[in-house]
Amino acid sequence: MLKYGGSIQRTDDGKLRCIDSDGTVVWNVDVSSPILSSPVTINDHIIFADTSGRVHTVSCSNGLQVHDTLSFGAEIFCSPTVHGGNVYLGCRDSHLHKLQHIGSA
């Protein structure tokens, strides 16, 4: 998980970054598409969606991609949610998607 009380910040210009408690940028990920929803964490992974319809999974510790990027082909504006080890999210294809165990290595 995030160390030393750090935080994860997303930007409208497609960046996700980890900021340490002293304000230092620990890592930065650029997905080149706006990230309008909040990321979630599960099992030392951060899961987030961008508006181009892609779902990304990166490591909390270094921001490196953990799983292949999933593409839904429709815009995603809502934040993913976690329940029972699964990740759920909706997108503009009018469906609720269940991503099983996406946070496991």
Image: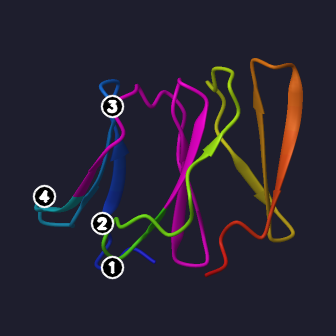
> Which tag, 4 or 2, sits closer to the chain's start?
2
Q: Which residue is mark 4?
A: 23
> Which tag, 3 or 4, sits closer to the chain's start?
4
Q: Which residue is mark 2?
A: 6
Residue pictured at 64% horizontal, 26% vertical: 76
Pinpoint residue 79: horizontal percent, then vertical percent. Answer: 64, 38
> Which tag, 2 or 3, sits closer to the chain's start?
2
Residue pictured at 34% horizontal, 32% vertical: 14
Tell me, yes or no, whether the two marked residues, 2 and 1, touch with CB atoms within 8 Å. yes
For disc 2, the neighbor class at 10 Å (few under 14, some 14 to 19, many from 20) is some
Q: Is residue 49 placed above or below 95 in the rendered structure?
A: below
Distance between mark 2 and mark 1 Cα atoms? 6 Å
Horizontal side of residue 90 vs 64, given as left or right: right
Distance between mark 2 and mark 3 Cα atoms? 24 Å
Mark 1: secondary structure: loop
Is residue 47 within the magenta segment? yes
Q: Amino acid at mark 3?
A: Ser
For disc 4, the neighbor class at 10 Å (few under 14, some 14 to 19, many from 20) is few
Mark 3: secondary structure: loop
Distance between mark 4 and mark 1 Cα atoms? 13 Å
Q: Amino acid at mark 1?
A: Lys
